[in-house]
Each structure stands twice: as C-alpha cells, then as structure tokens.
Image (cartoon, rainbow, N blue to C red):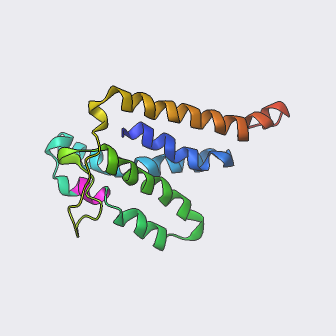
Amino acid sequence: MDTLAHALYGSAIVAHTRDEKKIFTAAAAGMMPDLVTYAVALASGHNLHDVNLTLYYTTHSLFIPTTLLVILPKRWKVYAVPYFLHVLFDIFTHCNSFSTQIFFPLSNLSFCTFNYTDHWWAWELNYGVIILLYYVIYLKWYKPFLRQGKPV
C-alpha cells in the first residue's frame, strides 16, 4: 500500500474527534514506517532501492508497534494503532525484496499475497474503500455539526 493511503487510514482512526492535531498525528503515525526509511535514503543520498533493507524490515516489523502499545502512556496508545495497521496492510500487499518480514529480526517470515503496485484494481479498490470510509465519517461525525451551524 502506498504512503498516502496509510496516512488516510491512520487519520480516519481519530477523525471522530474533529481535532486537527490528533488527525495530523495519526496520519504521521500511519506513514511512519515509510517516512523513516525514505528519510534515511534521502539523507544518505541513495534511492530507496539502494538503502540497506534491514532498516525497511525493522520499521515494518510488528515488534515496533507492539512495543509502542506496551510502553506508550495510555493517551498516546491510539497513535500506535495507525503504525500497526501500516505493517498489517503491508504484510499482504508487498512482495519480493520489499516483503514485510513480520517478526524481523527474529524471523524472515513474510507472505506474498499480491504486490499492490502490479495491479490497477488494488489501487482502485483501496481508494474506493478510503472514499467510502471518509464518506461514512463525514455523515456520522461532521454533517450533524454542519447542520446545527456549529464549527467542525
């Protein structure tokens, strides 16, 4: 799954709060595994494919979001969920050298259900679900406030 989709799913988790800071933070948490990898690639002057895949495997392991769920204070735990979803979605949508090694570094176990970049329908289905998700969020948590003339 692409980084923007991860951000959109992450922000949807807290969209009901209508708190822009929380929504932005959840979006950033959803993108975090990719952002860290991209930042190191950019800082090192290499493209993503040349970066040591150990960093990619580490940021996409379930150990990081699980650890965050354990160590973060209660009010911050919600931001570990978008990170966890990022890894979970990538487990089933990444193949070949970018397969998500679920329990890295203890295991190189990964699945190759399909590679989302190779299938047009995966993009359309994914963004169709996102549009539907945000429409439901709008109907449930935003439209009632707009009808009452209250600020969103």
In the rendered image, the residue lying farthest to the front is: 113
- Residue found 83% across the figure and 31% down from its top: 147
Q: Magenta stretch?
A: 55-59
Residue 95 at what x, y percent from top left? Answer: 23, 44
Residue 55 at what x, y percent from top left? Answer: 23, 56
Q: Quadrant of the N terminus?
A: top left
The residue lying toward the viewer, choosing from 116 and 46, is 116
- Residue found 57% across the figure and 49% down from its top: 13
The residue lying toward the viewer, choosing from 35 and 142, is 142
Question: Would you say the magenta stretch is mainly helix, strand or loop?
Answer: helix
Q: Quadrant of the C terminus?
A: top right
Is residue 120 placed above or below 7 in the rendered structure? above
Left or right of 79? Residue 89 is left
Left or right of 141? Residue 43 is left
In the rendered image, the residue lying farthest to the right is: 148
- Determine the image quadrant of residue 59: bottom left
Left or right of 107? Residue 1 is right
Residue 8 lies in the magenta stretch? no
Task: Please state the total of marks drawn on the protein image.
Answer: 0
Left or right of 21? Residue 41 is left
- Residue found 72% across the figure and 40% down from its top: 140
- Residue found 44% across the figure and 34% down from its top: 126
